[in-house]
Image (spheres, rainbow, N blue to C red):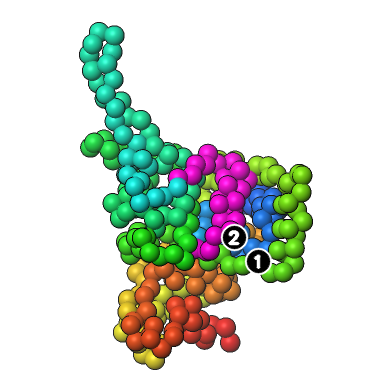
Amino acid sequence: MTASQDISAAAAQSDIVKSAQSVLEHVAAARAAIRTVIFGQEQVVEEALVTLIAGGHGLLVGVPGLAKTKLVETLGTVLGLDARRVQFTPDLMPADILGSEIMEEAPDRSRSFRFVRGPIFAQLLMADEINRASPRTQSALLQAMQEYHVTVAGERHDLPRPFHVLATQNPLEQEGTYPLPEAQLDRFLMQIDVLYPDRNAERRILIETTGEQQSSVKPAMTAQDLMTTQKLVRTLPVGESVVEAILDIVRSARPGEGDANITRHIAWGPGPRAAQAMMLASRARALVDGRLSPSIDDVLALAVPVLKHRMALSFAARAEGETLAGVIAKLTERFRT
């Protein structure tokens, strides 16, 4: 290599380092901004941020009143995204999400169809209580979540970039709801379980959200910053031990491939998309934590949210009181020693 090539390579490396440092600063600022209005949900905030930085979609599951809607609104503001919200109901139609064609008549009486875009044409779509809509309406999101475009009346319409769906689901009151099909669940990078806050966090909520003035959040990133971060995520180096850990965990969650004492509880397991999700999410979690390379600890921390909605327990396992989180914990146990 010549001297000029050495200088060029060094300059390129310096630019990469500067870009990475800028991304880390943006991500840290975004996380700090979210904390000013979302209290006591550190893991939920981290997983939601990881989902978006990894370029994926998230399913937030929790009982009413745990600030799921507030979190999505806050993420949209902090990340500088055009965010919209759709309340899913049994009478919601696919056209209410995607949009529809209307006939217009020109002054010369000629007629033509014009496509009116639906709320899905946003950078961040909140699908509130997604399981309350019919399967036909739920399926309207499938193509958008995977291919980033929709087809209406045979015409393709590209969605804005970045494009993310954060859906919420209430685990209670299942009467009259429609469980998401496995094909759609697999499109979600992670299932984020939103639990009750601890006492100190709930005390802070009481004091800071019931007064005359409430905290407001300001943008910490732009949509372009987010896309730059997502691009960086895909270039972060991943050690061989991390790759092997991902493969071991995902493959051992499939019936007939892992420990028979564990897999006998599994009706069906995760496919290759789960391993892809784990790889991207592990890199994104490293960035959120201020690091430029993921570790096995990142994989272990993300095993439950990445795999939980991509597996199902057997009838016998449910009868024995087993849970998916418990089964996944057993799959990852050997990596924790």
Q: What percent of the width, then of the height, locates residue 311?
A: 38, 73
Callout 1: few (<14), some (14-19), or many (20+) C-alpha neighbours within 10 Å? some
**Residue highlighted by disc 2:** 66
The correct choice, above or below, for 49 with respect to 118 in the image is below
**Which residue appears at 32% of the width and 62% of the height?**
181
Q: What percent of the width, then of the height, locates residue 213?
A: 76, 44
Q: Nearer the viewer, residue 228 or 132?
A: 132
**Residue highlighted by disc 1:** 197
Question: Are dots 1 and 2 in contact, CB under 8 Å?
Answer: yes
- Which residues are drawn in magenta? 61-86
**Which residue appears at 72% of the width and 52% of the height?**
209
On the picture, is 36 further left or further right than 257? right
Question: Is residue 295 highlighted in magenta?
Answer: no
Q: Is residue 53 visible?
A: no
Type of amino acid at the residue the image marks with label 1: Pro
Q: Quadrant of residue 111?
A: top left
**Which residue appears at 64% of the width and 63% of the height?**
41
Callout 2: few (<14), some (14-19), or many (20+) C-alpha neighbours within 10 Å? some
Q: Nearer the viewer, residue 93 or 50?
A: 93
Q: What percent of the width, then of the height, locates residue 287?
A: 61, 59
On the picture, is 204 further left or further right than 267? right
Secondary element under disc 2, as helix, strand or loop, is loop
Q: Nearer the viewer, residue 140 or 319?
A: 319
Q: Which mark is residue 216?
A: none
The correct choice, above or below, for 179 with respect to 15 in the image is below
On the picture, is 315 further left or further right than 280? left
